[in-house]
Amino acid sequence: MNLDLVEPIADDPAAAAKRLGICRAQLYVELAAGRLVARKAGRRTLIARVEQDRWLAALPIKAIAA
């Protein structure tokens, strides 16, 4: 089985920030505010991709000027 083709279900904060298009500092602001939820696996902090998708979907929609 080729593990390179397996899509991860969670990311560390640096990878999650990159995936979401925000800086790590903003990611930690969102975590502190409770708008984004992280999990701990030993010493590692992980943010589930489904949680990243939920956070992104909850952002306001930008209005397009006519």
Image: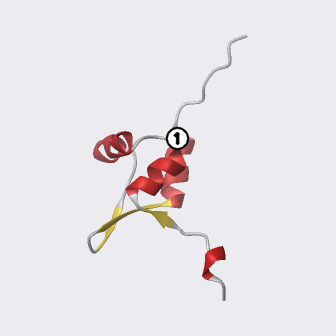
Q: Is the residue 56 above or below the residue 10 in the image? A: above
Query: Which quarter of the image is occupied by the N terminus?
Result: bottom right
Name the residue: 48% across, 65% down.
10
Number of on-image labels: 1
Query: Which quarter of the image is occupied by the C terminus?
Result: top right
Label 1 crowd (10 A; few <14 / some 14-19 / many >=20):
few
Q: Secondary structure at mark 1?
A: helix
- Of 29 and 55, the residue lying toward us: 29
Q: What residue does disc 1 label? A: 58
Give coordinates of residue 2: x percent, y percent: 66, 84
Amino acid type, callout 1 = Ala
Give coordinates of residue 35: x percent, y percent: 39, 44
Give coordinates of residue 29: x percent, y percent: 32, 40
In this picture, residue 51 sits left or right of residue 65: left
User: Residue 30, located in which quarter of the rendered image?
Assistant: top left
Give coordinates of residue 52: x percent, y percent: 50, 52
Q: Residue furthest bottom?
A: 1
In this picture, residue 55 sits left or right of residue 4: left
Name the residue: 52% across, 36% down.
59
